[in-house]
Amino acid sequence: MHAEQIVAPPRCISRTQATTLGSPRGEDFFATVRKLHRWLLLPGDSNGYGRQVTGVAAISLVVMLISGLVLRWPRDNVLRALDLLGVETIAGIKVDRRED
């Protein structure tokens, strides 16, 4: 049989005086902020649908970042890069390579 581990409550210790300051305050507040940040305070924690919502939001932000960089990039450099890669169409749209 395994011996049960006894977990002591977290305590703060003063570095300068080497004394125990007691238990930290505000743990409930920070737990709520963490649940808001990770799961939008939706039920189920890591197995709930809040995780999927934040995952889709994160992936969509990355897609918007990449598309914004592509749209902001100077046109001649994009066309040159597409030509080097041999790309003829993007999402079914023929790439126009004429110089303006």
Image (spheres, helix red, strand yellow):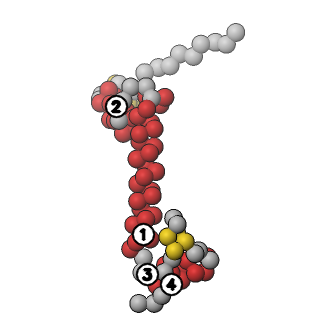
Does 8 sit above or below residue 32? above
Q: Residues within 10 Å of mark 2 (few under 14, many from 20)?
A: some
Of the residues shown, which amino acid type is indicated by label 2? Leu
Secondary structure found at label 2 = loop
| Quadrant of the snapshot with the C terminus | bottom left
Disc 1 designates what residue?
A: 69
Can residue 60 be seen by looking at this rendering?
yes
- Dot 1: element: helix
Task: Please tell me which of labels 4 and 3 falls first in the chain.
Answer: 3
* Residue at mark 2 to residue at mark 4: CA–CA distance: 49 Å
Residue for point 42% across, 81% down: 74
Which residue corresponds to mark 3? 75
Camera-side mark, 2 or 4: 4
Q: Comparing marks 1 and 2, which lies closer to the viewer?
A: 1
Q: Residue lying furthest top in this view?
A: 1
Q: 10 Å neighbourhood of mark 4: few (<14), some, or many (≥20)?
A: few
Which three-letter amino acid code belongs to the residue tagged 4?
Arg
- What is the total number of numbered labels drawn onto the structure image? 4
In front: mark 4 or mark 3? 4
- The amino acid sitting under disc 3 is Arg
Name which residue lies at 45% across and 43% down: 55
Label 4, label 3: how many angstroms apart (C-alpha)? 10 Å
**Residue 17 visible in the displayed image:** no
Q: Give the residue drawn at x 67%, y 13%.
A: 2
Q: Nearer the viewer, residue 15 or 95?
A: 95
Mark 1 → mark 3, Cα distance in angstroms: 11 Å
Residue at which label 4 appears = 97
